[in-house]
Image: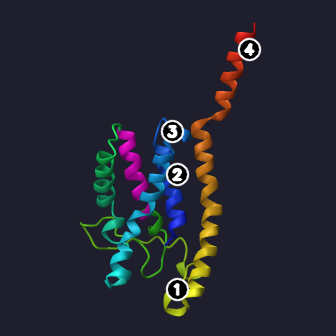
Amino acid sequence: MPLPAAHGLIGATVLSVIRKDLELRRDWPAILIGAAIGILPDLDLILVWGLGYPMKLHGSFTHSIVFAIAFGSALSLLLKESSIRGVLAYIGALLSHGLMDVATKKEFGGAQLLWPFTDQKYRMGLFSNYEFYPNPPTQSYIEILKQGFVLSLYEIAIFLPLLILILVLKTRPWKRRNAAAADEGLTNK
C-alpha cells in the first residue's frame, strides 16, 4: 500500500507517458491533475477514518477498473479533453493507483480491481507492508507520522527521478537546442 507520494508521482508519470504532445511549460496543470488523480482513489479512507466504516472498505470500488474508466471519462468531459489519448491518460493515472495497491500483501492491502463484478481483493504480494508501512494498532501517532514521513522521502527518491526522466524524454530539450543552432547557422551564412 504505497503512500500518497508514490501514488501521485506515478499518476503524473502515467499521464505524462500516455499524452502525446506533452510540453512541460504548457501542460504542467495536466501533470498536477495526474498527480492528484493518482491519489484520488484513497479518498475512500474518508469513509473508513472519518465516518467509521470498516477498514476492509479501503481498496474497494474507488480502486477498480470501472471506477477508473467512469471517473477518468467524466473528468475528461469536465476538463473538455478532446483527444482519446487525453482521456486514456486520466483513466491510466487513476488505474495506476489500484495496480500499485495490488502489489501489497497486508491484510487490508490489495484492491478490488474487478468491482462491481466481484468483491475479491487482488494482491500479488510483491512486498510486505509490515516491513515498511506504519501499523496503527501497534504504534503511537508520532511513530506513525515519523515512519510515514521517512517512507514518503523514499518514495519520492524512487519515483520522482522516473517522472523527471519521462518529462525530459517527452519534451526532448536537446532537439530544440539542435534546431535552434541549425537555424542560427542558416541565418549567419
For disc 2, the marked residue is: 13
Q: Position of residue 75 (x, y in %)?
A: 32, 51
Depth check: give the residue in front, 69 or 47.
47
Task: Please tell me which of labels 3 and 1 falls first in the chain.
Answer: 3
Q: How is the image coloured?
A: rainbow
Q: Nearer the viewer, mark 3 or mark 2?
A: 3
68 left or right of 135?
left
Please give the name of the residue rendered at 51% of the width and 45% of the height, measured from the top-left corner: 28
Q: Position of residue 185 (x, y in %)?
A: 74, 14
Query: Mark 3: which amino acid?
Result: Arg
Counting other residues with Cα less than 10 Å from the Cα at mark 2, is it few (<14), some (14-19), or many (20 or more)? many
- Residue 26 numbered tag: 3
- Whether residue 160 is visible here, answered yes or no, is yes
Q: Nearer the viewer, mark 3 or mark 1?
A: 3
Q: Secondary structure at mark 3?
A: helix
Dominant secondary structure (helix, strand or loop) of the stretch shown in magenta? helix
Q: Are marks 3 and 2 in contact (CB under 8 Å)?
A: no
Q: Is residue 4 above or below residue 133?
A: above
From the image, which quarter does the C terminus lie in?
top right
Please give the name of the residue rendered at 31% of the width and 54% of the height, measured from the top-left corner: 69
- Residue 185 numbered tag: 4
Q: Position of residue 54 (x, y in %)?
A: 33, 84
Q: Is residue 42 above or below residue 135?
A: above
Task: Please tell me which of labels 4 and 1 falls first in the chain.
Answer: 1
Query: Magenta segment range?
Result: 84-98
Q: Are marks 2 and 1 in contact (CB under 8 Å)?
A: no
Q: Is residue 86 magenta?
A: yes
Q: Position of residue 68 (x, y in %)?
A: 34, 57
Task: Please tell me which of labels 3 and 2 falls first in the chain.
Answer: 2
For disc 1, the marked residue is: 135
Q: CA distance from mark 2 to mark 4?
A: 36 Å
123 left or right of 80?
right
